Image (cartoon, rainbow, N blue to C red):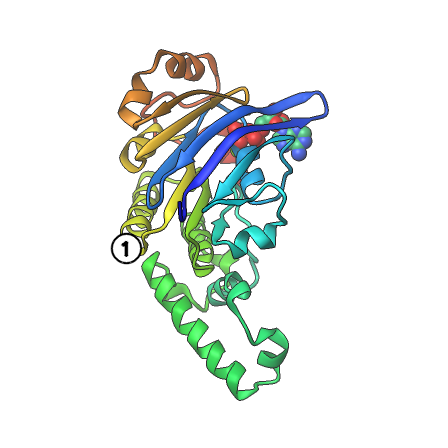
Amino acid sequence: MRDELIVSGLTVRFAGLTALDDVGFTVAPGSVHAVIGPNGAGKSTCFNVLSGVYRATEGSVTFGGTELTTLAPHRIAALGIARTFQNIALSRHLSVEDNLMLGRHRLTKAGFLSAGLRLPRARREDARHRARVRDIAEFVGVGDHLAAPVGMLPYGVQKRIELARGLAMEPRLLLLDEPVAGMNGTERQRMADVIVRARADLGISILLVEHDMGMVMRLADEVTVLDFGKRIAGGPPADVQRDPAVLRAYLGAAHEPTAGTATATEEEERERA
Ligand SMILES: Nc1ncnc2c1ncn2[C@@H]1O[C@H](COP(=O)(O)OP(=O)(O)O)[C@@H](O)[C@H]1O
Ligand SMILES: [Mg+2]
């Protein structure tokens, strides 16, 4: 089906370590699907396979029927899959606008060379992309910061700019790796609002890796729970939250936030620093 993401039998092994073990789940078009689990569960590894950064050892991932596991990252992006990273991966010295323009690179027909030469067609295309970038910046609430170097802006704003850069690629599926990690309550709420509107107004599917159970409960239609590389539970958030295997996995992980906690973990604090 168009825009449906199907992960099946996904296994990723590193030397001596199985990071993902026969994992399967489906992201329905236009839904928010959360992948949760304690540290080291394999969440980021899963994202890295979906975006072509890591190779699957076994298994398959299809998006709209196209097999992804053999494709390079730029080919996966061209299918309409965009991602953000657990740690901010923006160009700190570039302006917000330029960071978002870089996100549109794959959509730019004229290319940077003819744009640099200021050919009329390239100039028109550039203006069109800049207009769209401004709209996207407004959409995530950073429209006032377009000219500011990203590195000068507060952490919570930078996280929303990263999401905006994903949106600038005009994706059909957006992968968000811990979008509210290290944020305070207000910043979390703003990010949650953007995610809700991205799904509702833009109709895109969102696959979300998240620690914060409160966020997951509020945002997700479906949840997949990983622990030590295995899928231990899945379903609507209310069911998953009551699942004994999930409670065991979370209670067993000493350094994880417990269900409902909205404070930053030590790890998240380190990532901010
Ligand atoms: N490139 C890599 N090389 C070796 N081991 C890795 C690599 N990436 C992840 N791992 C290991 O795979 C496991 C899952 O990691 P990760 O997917 O980052 O977990 P999570 O995002 O759920 O915290 C961890 O044990 C981690 O150390
Ligand atoms: Mg991770």
- Disc 1 secondary structure class: helix
Q: Position of residue 87 (x, y in %)?
A: 53, 43
Q: Position of residue 249 (x, y in %)?
A: 44, 15
**Is the CB of mark 1 within 8 Å of ligand 2?**
no
Residue shown at 30% from the left, 35% from the top: 221
Q: Which residue is mark 1?
A: 201
Q: Amino acid at mark 1?
A: Asp
Quadrant assignment, res 91: bottom right
Q: Position of residue 33 (x, y in %)?
A: 37, 36
Q: Position of residue 143 (x, y in %)?
A: 36, 64
Q: How many marks?
A: 1
Q: List the single residue furthest toward the bottom.
A: 120
Q: Between residues 238 and 2, which one lies in front from this camera angle?
A: 2
Residue shown at 47% from the left, 67% from the top: 97
Let me know if residue 178 appears in the view.
Answer: no
Quadrant assignment, res 109: bottom right
Q: List the single residue furthest toward the right.
A: 15
Q: Is residue 10 left or right of residue 161?
A: right
Let me know if residue 221 appears in the view.
Answer: yes
Q: Between residues 143 and 9, which one lies in front from this camera angle?
A: 9
The C terminus, quarter of image: top right
> Relative to 60, is 235 above or below?
above
> Relative to 181, is 141 above or below?
below
